[in-house]
Image (spheres, grey):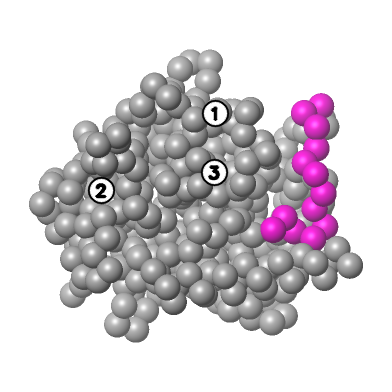
């Protein structure tokens, strides 16, 4: 019954997303439901016990790389005991069975338990063991230095799906960030909350094409937004609209700059619905939108927000929502975002994550 409920939930989520796309082009999706074999995340003591597993790089896992899309096998870029983001095994198996169009995909917090030349094993925070192709496992460093305004790839708190965030406080004893893959006017306030990121739970985004960054890829006559999982000399493995796993020719993709130079009045391209549309920059903070976070009237932090609704996963839909506004109704810049106005219908004013913005696109 639990398995049936989860499958019905995923189907309903997909139908809601489709309905949103037929409307204003943006659906306030929630992250994919926790994989059916998942239970509540482990306690801190249980997680620490898992983390003490002896690190190593010995290849002990047998099995061939197999994906529902064409992409070559890759060697493990992580070691035993390391924290990673990984695709749940049962979702991957469903995509192999029924096709990628029928299965939403995202990446979740896990730890590596064993390595293989083409496949490795990871353990989710709830203790589920997944045997996965190395291509769908993204390593997180045990420690990383960041500064104010840096972009990072992390995951939704309590073991949720992967998300990008902007650092708003880089004190020596704590890293705090605000999620970028959530609309600033998301009803539960997740687009404005400051979350504390523990070491080992994030990786700095420092170059275009890195896992978690945005690629604009031409599909037919339209440019579409994809989140990079892996890439090689010829192909890009990525998640597209509605969390659909795709493999695209690298020649059809452009890895977008992390901090594009966008001055007010400049013409740019931003994702809306399932494609990029032309827009005009209305305002941008220092360094292309990397503005410090407000310190007054800050919404509750993670510890007070555990019961709130979860935000949309970046793998499901581009974030394109109306901007936050001050008491006078004026648009207010948010850290890591750039305010633009669409040049074509529906001609909305949006707060777009800076790493989703393209300064040049059509040929």
Alpha-carbon neighbours of circle 1 within 10 Å: few (<14), some, or many (≥20)?
some
Residue 200 in view here: no
Alpha-carbon neighbours of circle 3 within 10 Å: few (<14), some, or many (≥20)?
some
Q: Residue furthest top?
A: 172
Q: Which residue is mark 3?
A: 188
Q: Are marks 2 and 3 in contact (CB under 8 Å)?
A: no
In the depicted structure, whether residue 177 falls above or below residue 182: above
- Residue at point 42% right, 60% down? 318
Query: The N terminus is located in which quarter?
Result: bottom right
Q: Residue 339 has which mark?
A: 2
For residue 40: magenta?
yes
* Secondary structure state at the residue bearing disc 3: loop
Alpha-carbon neighbours of circle 2 within 10 Å: few (<14), some, or many (≥20)?
many
Q: Residue furthest front?
A: 328
Q: Which residue is mark 1?
A: 300
- Residue at point 75% right, 58% down? 35
Q: Are marks 3 and 1 in contact (CB under 8 Å)?
A: no
Q: Residue furthest right?
A: 1
Residue 362 in view here: yes
Indicate left or right for 149 with 287 as reference.
Answer: right
Q: Residue 346 has which mark?
A: none
Of circles 1 and 2, the one toward us is: 1
Disc 2 to disc 3, C-alpha distance: 21 Å
């Amino acid at each position: 019954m639990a398995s049936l409920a989860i499958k019905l939930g995923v189907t309903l989520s997909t139908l809601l997303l489709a309905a949103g796309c037929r409307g204003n082009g943006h659906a306030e999706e929630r992250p994919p439901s926790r994989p059916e074999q998942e239970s509540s995340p482990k306690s801190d003591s249980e997680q620490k016990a898992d983390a003490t597993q002896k690190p190593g790089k010995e290849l002990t896992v047998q099995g061939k790389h197999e994906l529902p899309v064409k992409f070559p096998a890759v060697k493990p870029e992580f070691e035993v005991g390391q924290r990673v983001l990984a695709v749940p095994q049962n979702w991957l198996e469903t995509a192999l069975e029924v096709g990628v169009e029928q299965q939403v995909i995202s990446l979740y917090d896990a730890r590596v338990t064993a390595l293989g030349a083409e496949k490795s094993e990871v353990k989710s925070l709830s203790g589920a063991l997944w045997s996965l192709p190395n291509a769908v496992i993204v390593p997180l460093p045990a420690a990383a230095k960041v500064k104010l305004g840096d972009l990072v790839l992390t995951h939704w708190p309590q073991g949720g799906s992967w998300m990008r965030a902007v650092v708003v406080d880089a004190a020596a004893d704590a890293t705090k960030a605000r999620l970028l893959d959530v609309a600033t006017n998301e009803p539960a306030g997740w687009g404005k909350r400051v979350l504390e990121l523990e070491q080992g739970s994030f990786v700095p985004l420092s170059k275009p094409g890195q896992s978690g960054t945005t690629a604009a890829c031409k599909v037919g006559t339209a440019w579409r937004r994809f989140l990079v999982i892996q890439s090689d000399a010829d192909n890009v493995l990525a998640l597209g609209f509605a969390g659909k796993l795709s493999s695209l020719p690298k020649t059809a993709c452009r890895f977008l700059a992390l901090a594009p130079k966008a001055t007010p009045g400049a013409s740019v391209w931003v994702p809306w619905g399932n494609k990029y549309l032309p827009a005009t920059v209305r305002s941008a903070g220092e360094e292309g939108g990397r503005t410090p976070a407000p310190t007054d009237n800050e919404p509750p932090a993670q510890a007070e927000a555990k019961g709130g609704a979860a935000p949309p996963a970046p793998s499901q839909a581009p974030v394109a929502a109306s901007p936050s506004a001050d008491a006078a109704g004026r648009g207010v810049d948010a850290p890591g975002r750039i305010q633009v106005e669409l040049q074509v219908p529906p001609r909305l004013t949006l707060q777009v994550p800076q790493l989703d913005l393209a300064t040049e696109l059509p040929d």
